[in-house]
Image (cartoon, rainbow, N blue to C red):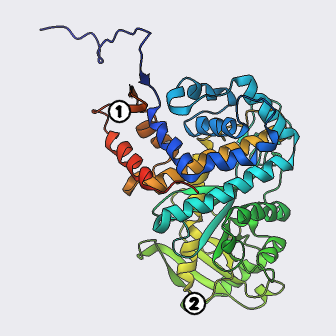
């Protein structure tokens, strides 16, 4: 009997291997860029920043950085992983060229941000059209979630400041389109703010909502078909009034703070007025009830606003607040949606928690920190992060099915993008041969086939 010398086989490592491509699964993102027309749209948008006799197109440089971030990079230098695989990603600019472009775009201020955002909005409409019944607006409505994100700074950067959680960094306000239970979500707004920016700042919420609406197809930029959801940070009079303004007519579901007036009204709600809360599958939510508040608690509120409160037994170990009552945790939200049961409206508002999943994905995709020093540079970085997150949402929406469409960025990287392949050149064709034993090879090839069947842009 031979003595075991370890748990893993010994492998000898040698350099000099040829025709092997790492991160070969990244071709899924490259094909998504091509079918969506994102490369041509970004290149056309950044044409004014292309210098005479320049070797690299500014749009391609920006997209290369976004692809590197989508594959797991978190700084400009990580574009090197694309530069190492020209057979898949084409010629990639050097690090100094990338840095110069970011500085140039940052120096132009709002001009560069406007054209990049306009190109993203144009491509988003095209992608939703390609997705058909799998698009987030397939039901005729669009839901946008606004939420703040704390981004820690580990060095002194412009506008970094102490945050309300006693950390140090920035406090961007972001918006995401919810894909519903069958998908993930995609970013439509990112407003960079100092770390000490307030949570209940109405002007910031209005600006973020404007950025988000500008990313939607024109028919969803006003009207009841677009729902804006926020937590209690958005529950300010000015922001709700802006959402309900005549001519805008947006639907909203906004968390509200339990004030003393609201608390006293809750105590007066009779037992018969409480309705059992429900889960997403239609089952009754154990230990939770909802009721609608009426009367003078709505005085001074926008016309048509409804105030719905939920009481629920707190989870084990949870601390009750002063605004809770009778041992029940109270939460409240405002909405202007009519003709639907209050339990259904409360469930719709509770599903706003999916925004936390989107924030987790953003942190895993370039938002763990802001890598650049100046605020203007980091605003460009936020646009790059959003492009990367767009690709990580569009590719599954167009090419993946079943549970795979719900995979978050880390799982996509681990199972699909990190797959290696052998590069074979025959005539004028380049072929990537994926490992037959890799468990997700069939999902990669099937997804590429679905992308190939989509019409080319234009």
Q: Residues within 10 Å of mark 2 (few under 14, many from 20)?
A: few
Which residue occupies the foreground of this view, 1 or 175?
175
Which residue occupies the foreground of this view, 58 or 304?
58
Instruction: Please tell me in which quadrant of the rendered image residue 199 appears.
Output: bottom right
The image position of residue 292, as x and y in percent, is: 63, 85
Badges 2 and 1: C-beta atoms under 8 Å apart?
no
Query: Horizontal placement of 77 versus 35: left or right?
Result: right
Query: Horizontal placement of 449 versus 365: left or right?
Result: left
Which residue occupies the foreground of this view, 162 or 316?
162
Q: Disc 1 designates what residue? A: 434
Instruction: Decide if residue 150 is in sight here.
Output: no
Q: Residue sitting at 60 percent across and 84 percent down? A: 291
Instruction: Please tell me in which quadrant of the rendered image residue 80 appears.
Output: top right
Please report whichever mark, 2 or 1, sits nearer to the chain's N-terminal start.
2
Against 10, residue 452 (above or below) is: below
Q: Residue sitting at 57 percent across and 83 percent down? A: 342
Against 224, residue 189 (above or below) is: above
Q: Disc 2 designates what residue? A: 273
The image position of residue 402, as x and y in percent, is: 37, 57
Quarter placement of the C terminus = bottom right
Which of label 2 and label 1 is nearer to you? 1
User: Secondary structure beneath disc 1?
Assistant: strand
The image position of residue 202, as x and y in percent, is: 83, 65
Against 107, residue 55 (above or below) is: above
Number of numbered discs overlaid on the protein picture: 2
Instruction: Decide if residue 21 is in sight here.
Output: yes
Which residue occupies the foreground of this view, 434 or 300?
434
The image position of residue 441, as x and y in percent, is: 34, 39
Most extreme residue toward the front, as rendered? 427
Q: Residues within 10 Å of mark 1 (few under 14, many from 20)?
A: many
Quarter placement of the N terminus = top left
Whole-number angstrom distance, CA of label 2 to CA of label 1? 61 Å
């Amino acid at each position: 009997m031979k003595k075991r010398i370890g748990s893993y086989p010994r492998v000898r490592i040698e350099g000099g291997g040829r025709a092997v491509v790492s991160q070969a699964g990244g071709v899924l993102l490259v094909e998504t860029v091509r079918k969506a027309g994102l490369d041509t749209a970004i290149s056309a948008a950044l044409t004014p920043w292309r210098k005479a006799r320049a070797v690299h197109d500014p749009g391609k440089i920006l997209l290369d950085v976004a692809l590197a971030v989508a594959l797991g990079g978190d700084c400009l230098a990580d574009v090197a992983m694309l530069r190492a695989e020209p057979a898949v990603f084409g010629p990639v600019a050097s690090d100094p060229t990338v840095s110069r472009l970011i500085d140039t775009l940052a120096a132009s201020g709002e001009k560069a941000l406007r054209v990049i955002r306009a190109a993203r909005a144009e491509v988003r409409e095209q992608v939703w059209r390609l997705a058909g019944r799998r698009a987030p607006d397939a039901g005729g409505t669009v839901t946008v979630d606004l939420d703040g994100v704390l981004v820690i700074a580990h060095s002194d950067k412009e506008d970094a400041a102490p945050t309300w959680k006693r950390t140090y960094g920035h406090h961007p306000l972001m918006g995401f389109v919810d894909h519903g239970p069958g998908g993930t979500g995609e970013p439509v707004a990112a407003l960079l703010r100092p770390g000490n920016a307030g949570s209940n700042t109405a002007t910031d919420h209005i600006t973020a909502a404007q950025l988000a609406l500008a990313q939607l197809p024109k028919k969803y930029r006003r009207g009841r078909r677009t729902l804006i959801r926020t937590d209690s940070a958005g529950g300010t009079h000015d922001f709700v009034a802006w959402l309900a303004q005549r001519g805008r007519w947006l639907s909203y579901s906004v968390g509200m703070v339990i004030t003393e007036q609201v608390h006293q009204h809750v105590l007066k709600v009779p037992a018969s007025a409480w309705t059992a809360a429900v889960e997403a599958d239609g089952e009754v939510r154990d230990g939770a009830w909802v009721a609608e508040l009426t009367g003078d608690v709505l005085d001074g509120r926008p016309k048509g606003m409804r105030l719905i409160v939920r009481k629920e037994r707190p989870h084990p170990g949870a601390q009750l607040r002063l605004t809770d009552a009778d041992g029940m945790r109270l939460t409240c939200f405002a909405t202007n949606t009519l003709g639907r049961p209050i339990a259904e409206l409360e469930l719709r508002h509770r599903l706003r928690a999916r925004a936390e999943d989107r924030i987790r994905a953003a942190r895993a995709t370039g938002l763990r920190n802001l890598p650049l020093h100046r605020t203007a540079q980091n605003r460009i970085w936020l646009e790059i992060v959003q492009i990367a997150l767009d690709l990580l949402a569009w590719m599954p929406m167009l090419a993946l099915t079943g549970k795979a469409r719900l995979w978050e960025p880390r799982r996509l990287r681990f199972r699909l993008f990190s797959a290696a392949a052998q590069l074979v050149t025959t005539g004028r064709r380049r072929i990537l041969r994926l490992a037959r034993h890799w468990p997700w090879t069939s999902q990669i090839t099937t997804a590429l086939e679905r992308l190939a069947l989509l019409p080319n842009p234009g």
